[in-house]
Image (spheres, rainbow, N blue to C red):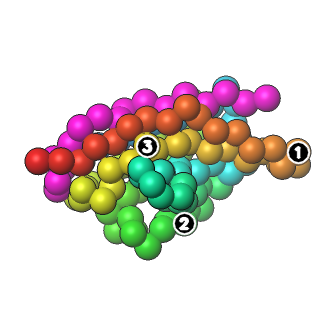
Amino acid sequence: QVQLVESGGGFVQPGGSLRLSCAASRTIFRMAWYRQAPGKERELVATINSTGGTNYADSVKGRFTISRDNAKNTIYLQMNNVIPEDTAVYYCNARTWPERNVYWGQGTQVTVSS
């Protein structure tokens, strides 16, 4: 089993920056950030594999950076140049291998507003 704890959400002005953290109870093969805005489906924001390879949604590419610190079993989402459309609950996601189990954090609210 895996526990995921997100932190770092809050209010930020458009154009500002915010860094989210997700601490896992152990090192995971694949981790990711998702987000869900009111009335919308949960969408993938960024993924990172065990060796640091990353992928990003088109909506955040060039503005967000996902990274991981394996020594701390933690991933981060550095959010730069944020826009109001980034407002959502952000969820940490982990997928194990070879079990192929999926785990979710409780979510952290990010609000981009003037």
What residue does disc 3 label?
89
Q: Would you say 112 lies left or right of 87 here?
A: left
What residue does disc 1 label?
99
Q: Which mark is residue 55?
A: 2
**Closest to the observer, 100 or 111:** 111
Q: Nearer the viewer, mark 3 or mark 2?
A: 3
Q: Identify the magenta region.
A: 1-16
Residue visible at 54% across and 55% down? Answer: 42
Camera sees residue 77: no
Q: Would you say 93 lies left or right of 82 here?
A: right
Callout count: 3
- Residues at discs 1 and 3 in contact (Cβ within 8 Å): no
Q: Is residue 11 above or below residue 38?
A: above
Q: Would you say 58 lies left or right of 75 here?
A: left
Q: Quadrant of residue 83?
A: bottom left
Disc 2 residue type (three-letter): Asn
Q: Is residue 1 above or below residue 90?
A: above
- Crowd tier of the residue under label 2, counting other residues whose Cα lies within 10 Å: few below 14, some 14–19, many 20 or above: some
Q: Quadrant of residue 61?
A: bottom left
Q: Quadrant of residue 23?
A: top right
